[in-house]
Image: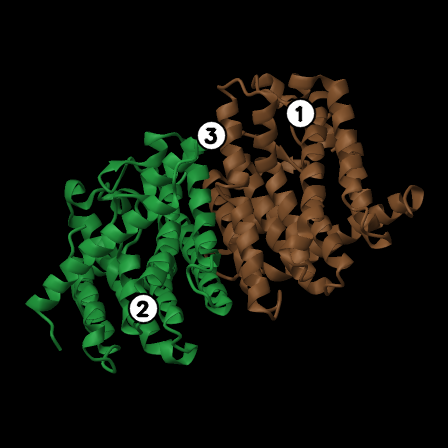
Chain colours: A green, B brown
Amino acid sequence: MGEGASGDSRLKEALVAIAGEVDGAFDALLPVPDDARARLYEAMRYAAIGGGKRLRPLLLTAVAGMYGVQREAAIRAAIALESIHVYSLIHDDLPCMDDDALRHGKPTLHLAFDESAAVLAGDSLHDFAFEVLSDPATSADPFTRIELVRVLATSSGAEGMAGGQMMDLVAETSEFDLHTITRLQQLKTGALLGAAVEMGAILGHVPPEGRTHLRSYARDIGLAFQIADDLIDHEGDAEVAGKAVGKDADAGKATFVSLMGAERARDQARMLVEQAVGHLSGHGEEADLLRSVARYIVERDH
Amino acid sequence: MGEGASGDSRLKEALVAIAGEVDGAFDALLPVPDDARARLYEAMRYAAIGGGKRLRPLLLTAVAGMYGVQREAAIRAAIALESIHVYSLIHDDLPCMDDDALRHGKPTLHLAFDESAAVLAGDSLHDFAFEVLSDPATSADPFTRIELVRVLATSSGAEGMAGGQMMDLVAETSEFDLHTITRLQQLKTGALLGAAVEMGAILGHVPPEGRTHLRSYARDIGLAFQIADDLIDHEGDAEVAGKAVGKDADAGKATFVSLMGAERARDQARMLVEQAVGHLSGHGEEADLLRSVARYIVERDH
Protein backbone atom coordinates (compact mmCIF):
# COMPACT_ATOMS: atom_id res chain seq x y z
CA MET A 1 0.00 0.00 0.00
CA GLY A 2 2.45 2.63 -1.18
CA GLU A 3 5.07 1.78 1.48
CA GLY A 4 8.86 1.70 1.30
CA ALA A 5 10.93 4.46 -0.28
CA SER A 6 8.01 6.69 -1.26
CA GLY A 7 6.54 6.28 2.28
CA ASP A 8 9.91 7.31 3.71
CA SER A 9 10.17 10.46 1.64
CA ARG A 10 6.57 11.38 2.41
CA LEU A 11 7.28 10.92 6.13
CA LYS A 12 10.37 13.13 5.88
CA GLU A 13 8.31 15.83 4.18
CA ALA A 14 5.60 15.48 6.81
CA LEU A 15 8.16 15.78 9.64
CA VAL A 16 9.66 18.93 8.14
CA ALA A 17 6.22 20.42 7.47
CA ILE A 18 4.82 19.80 10.95
CA ALA A 19 7.97 21.18 12.62
CA GLY A 20 7.57 24.43 10.70
CA GLU A 21 3.84 24.67 11.34
CA VAL A 22 4.19 24.01 15.08
CA ASP A 23 6.99 26.56 15.46
CA GLY A 24 5.00 29.08 13.44
CA ALA A 25 1.85 28.58 15.50
CA PHE A 26 3.68 28.86 18.85
CA ASP A 27 5.37 32.00 17.59
CA ALA A 28 2.07 33.56 16.52
CA LEU A 29 0.11 32.51 19.62
CA LEU A 30 2.73 33.51 22.22
CA PRO A 31 3.77 37.13 21.54
CA VAL A 32 5.92 38.61 24.31
CA PRO A 33 3.99 41.32 26.20
CA ASP A 34 5.62 44.65 26.97
CA ASP A 35 5.45 44.37 30.76
CA ALA A 36 6.96 42.49 33.71
CA ARG A 37 5.51 39.22 32.41
CA ALA A 38 7.88 39.31 29.42
CA ARG A 39 10.32 36.90 31.07
CA LEU A 40 7.54 34.31 31.50
CA TYR A 41 6.62 34.39 27.81
CA GLU A 42 10.29 34.28 26.80
CA ALA A 43 10.72 31.16 28.93
CA MET A 44 7.61 29.56 27.39
CA ARG A 45 8.90 30.33 23.89
CA TYR A 46 12.41 29.04 24.68
CA ALA A 47 10.96 25.66 25.59
CA ALA A 48 8.18 25.47 23.00
CA ILE A 49 9.82 26.73 19.82
CA GLY A 50 12.50 25.03 17.75
CA GLY A 51 12.97 21.62 19.27
CA GLY A 52 11.70 18.08 19.33
CA LYS A 53 10.47 15.67 16.71
CA ARG A 54 6.85 16.94 17.03
CA LEU A 55 5.74 13.34 16.92
CA ARG A 56 2.48 14.02 18.77
CA PRO A 57 1.45 16.87 16.43
CA LEU A 58 2.41 14.65 13.48
CA LEU A 59 0.18 11.83 14.72
CA LEU A 60 -2.73 14.13 15.53
CA THR A 61 -2.66 15.89 12.17
CA ALA A 62 -2.14 12.58 10.32
CA VAL A 63 -5.32 11.13 11.86
CA ALA A 64 -7.24 14.39 11.34
CA GLY A 65 -6.09 14.37 7.72
CA MET A 66 -7.60 10.90 7.21
CA TYR A 67 -11.01 12.38 8.02
CA GLY A 68 -10.73 15.61 6.02
CA VAL A 69 -10.31 17.94 9.03
CA GLN A 70 -9.29 21.50 8.14
CA ARG A 71 -5.53 21.85 8.63
CA GLU A 72 -5.76 24.98 10.81
CA ALA A 73 -8.05 23.28 13.32
CA ALA A 74 -5.78 20.23 13.48
CA ILE A 75 -2.71 22.42 14.05
CA ARG A 76 -4.43 24.25 16.91
CA ALA A 77 -5.31 20.97 18.62
CA ALA A 78 -1.75 19.78 17.96
CA ILE A 79 -0.38 22.95 19.60
CA ALA A 80 -2.47 22.24 22.71
CA LEU A 81 -1.19 18.67 22.87
CA GLU A 82 2.43 19.70 22.26
CA SER A 83 2.12 22.37 24.99
CA ILE A 84 1.30 19.60 27.46
CA HIS A 85 4.24 17.55 26.22
CA VAL A 86 6.62 20.53 26.48
CA TYR A 87 5.40 21.51 29.95
CA SER A 88 5.95 17.93 31.14
CA LEU A 89 9.53 17.96 29.80
CA ILE A 90 10.24 21.28 31.56
CA HIS A 91 9.06 19.95 34.93
CA ASP A 92 10.64 16.53 34.35
CA ASP A 93 14.04 18.18 33.76
CA LEU A 94 13.93 20.11 37.08
CA PRO A 95 16.65 19.37 39.65
CA CYS A 96 14.08 17.78 42.00
CA MET A 97 12.90 15.50 39.18
CA ASP A 98 15.35 14.04 36.60
CA ASP A 99 17.83 16.92 36.98
CA ASP A 100 18.71 17.10 33.29
CA ALA A 101 21.03 19.70 31.75
CA LEU A 102 20.31 19.09 28.07
CA ARG A 103 17.05 19.00 26.12
CA HIS A 104 16.74 19.04 22.32
CA GLY A 105 20.44 19.83 22.19
CA LYS A 106 20.26 23.03 24.25
CA PRO A 107 20.43 23.82 28.00
CA THR A 108 17.26 22.89 29.88
CA LEU A 109 14.94 25.77 30.79
CA HIS A 110 15.89 25.95 34.48
CA LEU A 111 19.54 26.40 33.44
CA ALA A 112 18.85 28.86 30.62
CA PHE A 113 16.51 30.88 32.90
CA ASP A 114 16.11 29.67 36.50
CA GLU A 115 14.08 27.12 38.42
CA SER A 116 11.22 29.41 39.33
CA ALA A 117 10.83 30.53 35.70
CA ALA A 118 10.84 26.85 34.69
CA VAL A 119 8.08 25.97 37.17
CA LEU A 120 5.93 28.91 36.06
CA ALA A 121 6.57 28.51 32.33
CA GLY A 122 5.59 24.84 32.61
CA ASP A 123 2.44 25.77 34.52
CA SER A 124 1.61 28.47 31.96
CA LEU A 125 2.03 26.14 28.98
CA HIS A 126 -0.21 23.71 30.85
CA ASP A 127 -3.00 26.33 30.93
CA PHE A 128 -2.19 27.52 27.42
CA ALA A 129 -3.14 24.07 26.11
CA PHE A 130 -6.67 24.42 27.47
CA GLU A 131 -6.93 28.06 26.42
CA VAL A 132 -6.19 27.05 22.84
CA LEU A 133 -8.68 24.17 22.87
CA SER A 134 -11.48 26.24 24.40
CA ASP A 135 -11.17 28.93 21.72
CA PRO A 136 -13.82 28.69 18.96
CA ALA A 137 -11.00 28.97 16.37
CA THR A 138 -10.16 25.33 17.19
CA SER A 139 -13.70 24.18 16.34
CA ALA A 140 -16.98 26.05 15.98
CA ASP A 141 -18.68 23.13 17.74
CA PRO A 142 -18.54 23.39 21.56
CA PHE A 143 -19.01 19.62 21.94
CA THR A 144 -15.89 18.97 19.85
CA ARG A 145 -13.93 21.49 21.93
CA ILE A 146 -14.98 20.06 25.29
CA GLU A 147 -14.26 16.50 24.10
CA LEU A 148 -10.74 17.60 23.15
CA VAL A 149 -10.34 19.11 26.64
CA ARG A 150 -11.64 15.97 28.32
CA VAL A 151 -9.27 13.64 26.45
CA LEU A 152 -6.24 15.89 26.92
CA ALA A 153 -6.84 16.54 30.65
CA THR A 154 -7.43 12.85 31.36
CA SER A 155 -4.36 11.76 29.37
CA SER A 156 -2.14 14.33 31.01
CA GLY A 157 -3.11 14.06 34.70
CA ALA A 158 -2.87 11.52 37.50
CA GLU A 159 -4.80 8.91 35.47
CA GLY A 160 -2.34 9.32 32.60
CA MET A 161 1.07 10.91 32.08
CA ALA A 162 1.56 12.38 35.58
CA GLY A 163 0.53 9.04 37.10
CA GLY A 164 3.20 7.36 34.96
CA GLN A 165 5.79 9.92 36.05
CA MET A 166 5.02 9.16 39.69
CA MET A 167 5.41 5.42 39.00
CA ASP A 168 8.74 6.26 37.36
CA LEU A 169 9.89 8.00 40.56
CA VAL A 170 8.77 5.03 42.65
CA ALA A 171 10.67 2.75 40.22
CA GLU A 172 13.97 4.20 41.48
CA THR A 173 13.47 2.49 44.83
CA SER A 174 11.30 -0.50 43.83
CA GLU A 175 11.91 -3.64 41.81
CA PHE A 176 9.36 -3.38 39.01
CA ASP A 177 8.60 -6.40 36.85
CA LEU A 178 7.85 -6.34 33.12
CA HIS A 179 4.12 -6.05 33.73
CA THR A 180 4.52 -2.97 35.96
CA ILE A 181 7.07 -1.36 33.62
CA THR A 182 4.63 -1.85 30.74
CA ARG A 183 1.84 -0.20 32.74
CA LEU A 184 4.18 2.64 33.76
CA GLN A 185 5.14 3.35 30.16
CA GLN A 186 1.57 3.05 28.88
CA LEU A 187 0.78 5.94 31.23
CA LYS A 188 3.98 7.99 31.04
CA THR A 189 4.44 8.00 27.26
CA GLY A 190 1.48 6.07 25.89
CA ALA A 191 -1.25 8.32 27.29
CA LEU A 192 -0.25 11.41 25.27
CA LEU A 193 0.43 9.39 22.10
CA GLY A 194 -3.04 7.91 22.56
CA ALA A 195 -4.43 11.41 23.05
CA ALA A 196 -2.84 12.47 19.74
CA VAL A 197 -4.75 9.82 17.83
CA GLU A 198 -7.95 10.30 19.82
CA MET A 199 -7.93 14.09 19.37
CA GLY A 200 -7.46 13.72 15.61
CA ALA A 201 -10.45 11.35 15.56
CA ILE A 202 -12.58 13.75 17.65
CA LEU A 203 -11.87 16.56 15.18
CA GLY A 204 -12.85 14.13 12.41
CA HIS A 205 -16.14 13.38 14.20
CA VAL A 206 -15.30 9.67 14.34
CA PRO A 207 -17.72 8.21 16.93
CA PRO A 208 -16.03 6.64 20.01
CA GLU A 209 -16.85 3.07 18.89
CA GLY A 210 -15.17 3.75 15.55
CA ARG A 211 -11.92 4.73 17.25
CA THR A 212 -11.05 1.28 18.63
CA HIS A 213 -8.55 0.37 15.91
CA LEU A 214 -6.89 3.79 16.18
CA ARG A 215 -6.63 3.36 19.93
CA SER A 216 -5.03 -0.07 19.46
CA TYR A 217 -2.60 1.40 16.92
CA ALA A 218 -1.67 4.12 19.44
CA ARG A 219 -1.19 1.63 22.27
CA ASP A 220 1.20 -0.48 20.20
CA ILE A 221 3.29 2.39 18.84
CA GLY A 222 3.40 3.92 22.34
CA LEU A 223 5.03 0.82 23.75
CA ALA A 224 7.31 0.44 20.71
CA PHE A 225 8.32 4.09 21.16
CA GLN A 226 9.34 3.51 24.77
CA ILE A 227 11.28 0.35 24.01
CA ALA A 228 13.11 2.30 21.27
CA ASP A 229 13.80 5.05 23.82
CA ASP A 230 15.25 2.49 26.23
CA LEU A 231 17.46 1.15 23.42
CA ILE A 232 18.66 4.69 22.62
CA ASP A 233 19.33 5.27 26.33
CA HIS A 234 21.20 1.95 26.47
CA GLU A 235 23.28 2.25 23.31
CA GLY A 236 22.90 5.81 22.15
CA ASP A 237 25.07 8.82 21.73
CA ALA A 238 24.14 11.90 23.79
CA GLU A 239 25.03 14.20 20.91
CA VAL A 240 22.71 12.43 18.48
CA ALA A 241 19.98 11.95 21.12
CA GLY A 242 20.14 15.64 22.15
CA LYS A 243 19.81 14.61 25.79
CA ALA A 244 21.75 12.64 28.41
CA VAL A 245 21.86 8.86 27.81
CA GLY A 246 22.56 5.89 30.11
CA LYS A 247 20.66 7.55 32.95
CA ASP A 248 18.27 4.69 33.69
CA ALA A 249 21.05 2.17 34.14
CA ASP A 250 22.93 4.62 36.37
CA ALA A 251 19.80 5.10 38.47
CA GLY A 252 19.39 1.33 38.75
CA LYS A 253 15.94 1.55 37.17
CA ALA A 254 14.41 -1.45 35.45
CA THR A 255 13.77 -0.81 31.74
CA PHE A 256 12.56 -2.99 28.88
CA VAL A 257 16.23 -3.47 27.93
CA SER A 258 17.38 -4.40 31.44
CA LEU A 259 14.46 -6.84 31.85
CA MET A 260 14.46 -8.40 28.35
CA GLY A 261 17.96 -7.79 26.98
CA ALA A 262 18.64 -5.54 23.97
CA GLU A 263 18.06 -8.23 21.35
CA ARG A 264 14.64 -9.33 22.60
CA ALA A 265 13.64 -5.72 23.22
CA ARG A 266 14.45 -4.85 19.60
CA ASP A 267 12.42 -7.83 18.35
CA GLN A 268 9.53 -6.85 20.60
CA ALA A 269 9.53 -3.27 19.29
CA ARG A 270 9.47 -4.52 15.67
CA MET A 271 6.65 -6.94 16.49
CA LEU A 272 4.63 -4.12 18.08
CA VAL A 273 5.09 -1.96 14.99
CA GLU A 274 3.79 -4.73 12.72
CA GLN A 275 0.87 -5.21 15.08
CA ALA A 276 0.19 -1.44 15.03
CA VAL A 277 0.19 -1.42 11.22
CA GLY A 278 -2.17 -4.41 11.31
CA HIS A 279 -4.75 -2.34 13.17
CA LEU A 280 -4.91 -0.03 10.14
CA SER A 281 -5.86 -2.82 7.71
CA GLY A 282 -9.36 -1.38 7.33
CA HIS A 283 -7.84 1.78 5.84
CA GLY A 284 -6.35 2.38 2.42
CA GLU A 285 -3.70 4.86 1.29
CA GLU A 286 -5.06 7.58 3.56
CA ALA A 287 -3.41 5.76 6.51
CA ASP A 288 0.02 5.46 4.83
CA LEU A 289 1.43 8.29 6.92
CA LEU A 290 0.40 6.48 10.13
CA ARG A 291 2.09 3.32 8.81
CA SER A 292 5.31 5.25 8.12
CA VAL A 293 5.18 6.88 11.56
CA ALA A 294 4.95 3.43 13.19
CA ARG A 295 8.09 2.25 11.34
CA TYR A 296 9.94 5.52 12.03
CA ILE A 297 9.36 5.14 15.76
CA VAL A 298 11.66 2.12 16.06
CA GLU A 299 14.18 3.14 13.40
CA ARG A 300 15.00 6.63 14.75
CA ASP A 301 18.25 7.24 16.66
CA HIS A 302 16.95 10.14 18.79
CA MET B 1 -30.74 44.86 53.05
CA GLY B 2 -30.51 42.19 55.72
CA GLU B 3 -26.93 43.08 56.70
CA GLY B 4 -25.26 43.20 60.12
CA ALA B 5 -25.53 40.42 62.68
CA SER B 6 -27.80 38.18 60.62
CA GLY B 7 -25.51 38.60 57.59
CA ASP B 8 -22.55 37.62 59.79
CA SER B 9 -24.17 34.46 61.07
CA ARG B 10 -25.30 33.51 57.57
CA LEU B 11 -21.74 34.01 56.32
CA LYS B 12 -20.39 31.83 59.13
CA GLU B 13 -22.87 29.12 58.22
CA ALA B 14 -21.96 29.44 54.54
CA LEU B 15 -18.23 29.20 55.33
CA VAL B 16 -18.75 26.04 57.41
CA ALA B 17 -21.04 24.53 54.78
CA ILE B 18 -18.74 25.17 51.81
CA ALA B 19 -15.70 23.82 53.72
CA GLY B 20 -17.54 20.55 54.34
CA GLU B 21 -18.85 20.28 50.78
CA VAL B 22 -15.45 20.98 49.22
CA ASP B 23 -13.69 18.45 51.46
CA GLY B 24 -16.41 15.90 50.76
CA ALA B 25 -16.20 16.39 47.00
CA PHE B 26 -12.40 16.15 46.89
CA ASP B 27 -12.62 13.01 49.02
CA ALA B 28 -15.19 11.42 46.70
CA LEU B 29 -13.50 12.47 43.45
CA LEU B 30 -9.93 11.51 44.40
CA PRO B 31 -9.97 7.90 45.67
CA VAL B 32 -6.48 6.44 46.14
CA PRO B 33 -5.78 3.73 43.53
CA ASP B 34 -4.28 0.42 44.59
CA ASP B 35 -1.09 0.71 42.53
CA ALA B 36 2.21 2.61 42.35
CA ARG B 37 0.33 5.87 41.74
CA ALA B 38 -1.08 5.78 45.29
CA ARG B 39 1.56 8.22 46.56
CA LEU B 40 0.52 10.79 43.94
CA TYR B 41 -3.13 10.68 44.98
CA GLU B 42 -2.16 10.81 48.66
CA ALA B 43 -0.13 13.96 47.95
CA MET B 44 -3.04 15.52 46.02
CA ARG B 45 -5.41 14.75 48.91
CA TYR B 46 -2.97 16.06 51.54
CA ALA B 47 -2.94 19.44 49.81
CA ALA B 48 -6.57 19.59 48.71
CA ILE B 49 -8.50 18.33 51.72
CA GLY B 50 -8.96 20.03 55.06
CA GLY B 51 -7.43 23.46 54.70
CA GLY B 52 -8.03 26.99 53.54
CA LYS B 53 -10.95 29.36 53.79
CA ARG B 54 -12.49 28.06 50.51
CA LEU B 55 -13.17 31.65 49.58
CA ARG B 56 -13.21 30.96 45.84
CA PRO B 57 -15.72 28.08 46.13
CA LEU B 58 -17.81 30.30 48.44
CA LEU B 59 -17.88 33.10 45.87
CA LEU B 60 -18.61 30.80 42.95
CA THR B 61 -21.47 29.01 44.71
CA ALA B 62 -22.85 32.31 46.07
CA VAL B 63 -23.12 33.74 42.54
CA ALA B 64 -24.49 30.46 41.16
CA GLY B 65 -27.07 30.47 43.97
CA MET B 66 -28.29 33.91 42.89
CA TYR B 67 -29.29 32.41 39.55
CA GLY B 68 -30.84 29.18 40.80
CA VAL B 69 -28.01 26.87 39.66
CA GLN B 70 -28.23 23.32 41.02
CA ARG B 71 -25.91 23.01 44.03
CA GLU B 72 -24.12 19.88 42.75
CA ALA B 73 -23.11 21.58 39.49
CA ALA B 74 -21.86 24.65 41.37
CA ILE B 75 -19.81 22.49 43.75
CA ARG B 76 -18.18 20.66 40.83
CA ALA B 77 -17.18 23.95 39.20
CA ALA B 78 -15.96 25.16 42.60
CA ILE B 79 -13.84 22.02 42.98
CA ALA B 80 -12.21 22.73 39.62
CA LEU B 81 -11.46 26.31 40.63
CA GLU B 82 -10.16 25.32 44.07
CA SER B 83 -7.93 22.65 42.44
CA ILE B 84 -6.23 25.43 40.48
CA HIS B 85 -5.84 27.50 43.64
CA VAL B 86 -4.40 24.54 45.59
CA TYR B 87 -2.00 23.56 42.77
CA SER B 88 -0.73 27.16 42.66
CA LEU B 89 -0.09 27.15 46.42
CA ILE B 90 1.82 23.85 46.18
CA HIS B 91 4.12 25.19 43.45
CA ASP B 92 4.38 28.61 45.11
CA ASP B 93 5.60 26.99 48.35
CA LEU B 94 8.43 25.07 46.59
CA PRO B 95 12.02 25.86 47.65
CA CYS B 96 12.75 27.43 44.24
CA MET B 97 9.70 29.68 44.62
CA ASP B 98 8.68 31.15 48.03
CA ASP B 99 10.27 28.29 50.00
CA ASP B 100 7.53 28.09 52.61
CA ALA B 101 7.37 25.50 55.39
CA LEU B 102 3.83 26.08 56.63
CA ARG B 103 0.51 26.15 54.79
CA HIS B 104 -2.93 26.07 56.43
CA GLY B 105 -1.17 25.30 59.69
CA LYS B 106 0.55 22.12 58.51
CA PRO B 107 3.87 21.36 56.78
CA THR B 108 3.90 22.27 53.09
CA LEU B 109 3.55 19.38 50.64
CA HIS B 110 7.21 19.23 49.62
CA LEU B 111 8.15 18.81 53.29
CA ALA B 112 5.38 16.32 54.13
CA PHE B 113 6.21 14.31 50.97
CA ASP B 114 9.10 15.53 48.81
CA GLU B 115 9.73 18.08 46.06
CA SER B 116 9.09 15.75 43.14
CA ALA B 117 5.77 14.63 44.65
CA ALA B 118 4.86 18.30 45.14
CA VAL B 119 5.61 19.17 41.51
CA LEU B 120 3.60 16.19 40.22
CA ALA B 121 0.69 16.58 42.65
CA GLY B 122 0.42 20.24 41.63
CA ASP B 123 0.50 19.31 37.96
CA SER B 124 -2.10 16.59 38.53
CA LEU B 125 -4.50 18.90 40.38
CA HIS B 126 -4.03 21.32 37.48
CA ASP B 127 -5.33 18.67 35.05
CA PHE B 128 -7.95 17.48 37.51
CA ALA B 129 -9.59 20.91 37.34
CA PHE B 130 -10.17 20.54 33.61
CA GLU B 131 -11.19 16.89 33.92
CA VAL B 132 -13.91 17.89 36.37
CA LEU B 133 -15.16 20.74 34.17
CA SER B 134 -15.22 18.65 30.99
CA ASP B 135 -17.37 15.95 32.62
CA PRO B 136 -21.08 16.14 31.71
CA ALA B 137 -21.89 15.88 35.43
CA THR B 138 -20.80 19.53 35.74
CA SER B 139 -23.31 20.64 33.10
CA ALA B 140 -25.26 18.74 30.47
CA ASP B 141 -24.63 21.65 28.08
CA PRO B 142 -21.24 21.42 26.29
CA PHE B 143 -21.18 25.18 25.68
CA THR B 144 -21.44 25.86 29.42
CA ARG B 145 -18.63 23.37 30.08
CA ILE B 146 -16.27 24.80 27.47
CA GLU B 147 -16.97 28.36 28.68
CA LEU B 148 -16.00 27.29 32.21
CA VAL B 149 -12.79 25.81 30.81
CA ARG B 150 -12.02 28.95 28.83
CA VAL B 151 -12.47 31.28 31.81
CA LEU B 152 -10.51 29.06 34.20
CA ALA B 153 -7.59 28.43 31.81
CA THR B 154 -7.30 32.12 30.93
CA SER B 155 -7.49 33.23 34.58
CA SER B 156 -4.93 30.68 35.69
CA GLY B 157 -2.23 30.97 33.00
CA ALA B 158 0.29 33.53 31.80
CA GLU B 159 -2.46 36.10 31.13
CA GLY B 160 -3.70 35.70 34.71
CA MET B 161 -2.43 34.13 37.92
CA ALA B 162 0.85 32.68 36.60
CA GLY B 163 1.63 36.03 34.92
CA GLY B 164 1.11 37.72 38.31
CA GLN B 165 3.36 35.19 40.01
CA MET B 166 6.13 35.96 37.51
CA MET B 167 5.68 39.69 38.18
CA ASP B 168 5.95 38.88 41.88
CA LEU B 169 9.30 37.15 41.29
CA VAL B 170 10.53 40.11 39.25
CA ALA B 171 9.37 42.40 42.10
CA GLU B 172 12.13 40.98 44.33
CA THR B 173 14.76 42.70 42.21
CA SER B 174 12.78 45.66 40.81
CA GLU B 175 11.30 48.81 42.33
CA PHE B 176 7.60 48.50 41.54
CA ASP B 177 5.31 51.51 41.95
CA LEU B 178 1.72 51.41 43.17
CA HIS B 179 0.39 51.10 39.63
CA THR B 180 2.53 48.04 38.89
CA ILE B 181 1.80 46.44 42.27
CA THR B 182 -1.91 46.90 41.60
CA ARG B 183 -1.57 45.25 38.19
CA LEU B 184 0.52 42.43 39.71
CA GLN B 185 -2.11 41.72 42.35
CA GLN B 186 -5.00 41.98 39.91
CA LEU B 187 -3.36 39.10 38.07
CA LYS B 188 -1.89 37.07 40.93
CA THR B 189 -4.94 37.05 43.23
CA GLY B 190 -7.62 38.93 41.35
CA ALA B 191 -7.75 36.67 38.30
CA LEU B 192 -8.97 33.59 40.18
CA LEU B 193 -11.39 35.59 42.36
CA GLY B 194 -12.76 37.06 39.13
CA ALA B 195 -13.00 33.53 37.69
CA ALA B 196 -15.05 32.46 40.74
CA VAL B 197 -17.69 35.09 40.03
CA GLU B 198 -17.57 34.58 36.26
CA MET B 199 -17.90 30.80 36.52
CA GLY B 200 -20.93 31.15 38.81
CA ALA B 201 -22.50 33.50 36.25
CA ILE B 202 -21.73 31.09 33.36
CA LEU B 203 -23.47 28.27 35.23
CA GLY B 204 -26.39 30.68 35.76
CA HIS B 205 -26.50 31.40 32.01
CA VAL B 206 -25.99 35.13 32.62
CA PRO B 207 -24.98 36.57 29.24
CA PRO B 208 -21.47 38.16 29.14
CA GLU B 209 -22.87 41.72 28.98
CA GLY B 210 -24.92 41.04 32.11
CA ARG B 211 -21.83 40.10 34.08
CA THR B 212 -20.23 43.56 34.12
CA HIS B 213 -21.33 44.49 37.65
CA LEU B 214 -20.24 41.07 38.98
CA ARG B 215 -16.86 41.51 37.31
CA SER B 216 -16.51 44.97 38.90
CA TYR B 217 -17.47 43.51 42.28
CA ALA B 218 -14.80 40.81 41.85
CA ARG B 219 -12.13 43.32 40.83
CA ASP B 220 -12.74 45.45 43.92
CA ILE B 221 -12.84 42.60 46.42
CA GLY B 222 -9.75 41.08 44.77
CA LEU B 223 -7.75 44.21 45.45
CA ALA B 224 -9.23 44.58 48.96
CA PHE B 225 -8.31 40.95 49.61
CA GLN B 226 -4.68 41.54 48.67
CA ILE B 227 -4.39 44.72 50.73
CA ALA B 228 -5.82 42.77 53.69
CA ASP B 229 -3.24 40.03 53.02
CA ASP B 230 -0.45 42.61 53.05
CA LEU B 231 -1.79 43.96 56.36
CA ILE B 232 -1.84 40.41 57.81
CA ASP B 233 1.70 39.86 56.53
CA HIS B 234 2.74 43.20 58.06
CA GLU B 235 1.06 42.89 61.46
CA GLY B 236 -0.12 39.33 61.72
CA ASP B 237 0.65 36.34 63.84
CA ALA B 238 2.01 33.26 62.02
CA GLU B 239 -0.01 30.96 64.26
CA VAL B 240 -3.29 32.69 63.44
CA ALA B 241 -2.39 33.15 59.77
CA GLY B 242 -1.40 29.48 59.41
CA LYS B 243 1.57 30.52 57.28
CA ALA B 244 4.78 32.51 57.63
CA VAL B 245 4.30 36.29 58.01
CA GLY B 246 6.62 39.27 57.46
CA LYS B 247 8.14 37.63 54.40
CA ASP B 248 7.54 40.46 51.94
CA ALA B 249 9.31 43.00 54.11
CA ASP B 250 12.20 40.57 54.63
CA ALA B 251 12.44 40.09 50.86
CA GLY B 252 12.44 43.87 50.36
CA LYS B 253 9.35 43.60 48.17
CA ALA B 254 7.07 46.57 47.69
CA THR B 255 3.54 45.92 48.99
CA PHE B 256 0.45 48.08 49.38
CA VAL B 257 1.47 48.58 53.02
CA SER B 258 5.07 49.55 52.24
CA LEU B 259 3.93 51.95 49.52
CA MET B 260 0.87 53.50 51.28
CA GLY B 261 1.47 52.90 54.97
CA ALA B 262 -0.77 50.65 57.08
CA GLU B 263 -3.35 53.31 57.88
CA ARG B 264 -4.01 54.40 54.31
CA ALA B 265 -3.94 50.78 53.14
CA ARG B 266 -6.65 49.90 55.66
CA ASP B 267 -8.78 52.86 54.52
CA GLN B 268 -8.28 51.87 50.91
CA ALA B 269 -9.39 48.29 51.57
CA ARG B 270 -12.54 49.52 53.33
CA MET B 271 -13.28 51.92 50.48
CA LEU B 272 -12.89 49.10 47.93
CA VAL B 273 -15.30 46.93 49.91
CA GLU B 274 -17.95 49.67 49.92
CA GLN B 275 -17.38 50.13 46.19
CA ALA B 276 -17.74 46.36 45.64
CA VAL B 277 -21.01 46.32 47.56
CA GLY B 278 -22.17 49.28 45.46
CA HIS B 279 -21.83 47.21 42.29
CA LEU B 280 -24.51 44.88 43.70
CA SER B 281 -27.12 47.64 44.07
CA GLY B 282 -29.19 46.16 41.27
CA HIS B 283 -29.67 43.02 43.34
CA GLY B 284 -31.88 42.41 46.35
CA GLU B 285 -31.51 39.94 49.21
CA GLU B 286 -30.20 37.23 46.91
CA ALA B 287 -26.85 39.08 46.85
CA ASP B 288 -26.56 39.40 50.66
CA LEU B 289 -24.02 36.60 50.85
CA LEU B 290 -21.79 38.42 48.32
CA ARG B 291 -22.11 41.59 50.44
CA SER B 292 -21.07 39.68 53.57
CA VAL B 293 -18.13 38.07 51.73
CA ALA B 294 -16.88 41.52 50.71
CA ARG B 295 -16.90 42.72 54.34
CA TYR B 296 -15.36 39.47 55.61
CA ILE B 297 -12.44 39.87 53.23
CA VAL B 298 -11.04 42.91 55.05
CA GLU B 299 -12.05 41.88 58.56
CA ARG B 300 -10.44 38.41 58.62
CA ASP B 301 -7.15 37.82 60.47
CA HIS B 302 -5.95 34.90 58.30
Q: Are marks 3 and 2 on the same chain?
A: yes
The answer to whether residue A168 shows anywhere in this view is yes
Q: Which mark is residue A35?
A: 3
Q: Position of residue B294 (x, y in %)?
A: 77, 40
Name, please, the residue furthest toward the left.
Answer: A5
In the picture, residue B239 is in which quadrant? top right
Q: Amino acid at mark 1?
A: Val
B130 sits left or right of A167 in the view: right
Q: Position of residue A152 (x, y in %)?
A: 43, 60
Q: Amino acid at mark 2?
A: Ala
Quadrant holding the N terminus of chain A? bottom left
The answer to whether residue B109 shows anywhere in this view is no
In the image, residue A297 sits, relative to residue B274, either above or below, namely: below
Name, please, the residue furthest toward the front.
Answer: B209
Q: Which mark is residue A64?
A: 2
Residue identified by numbered label 1: B245
Label 1 vs label 3: CA separation? 28 Å
- Residue at image position (50%, 64%) is A146
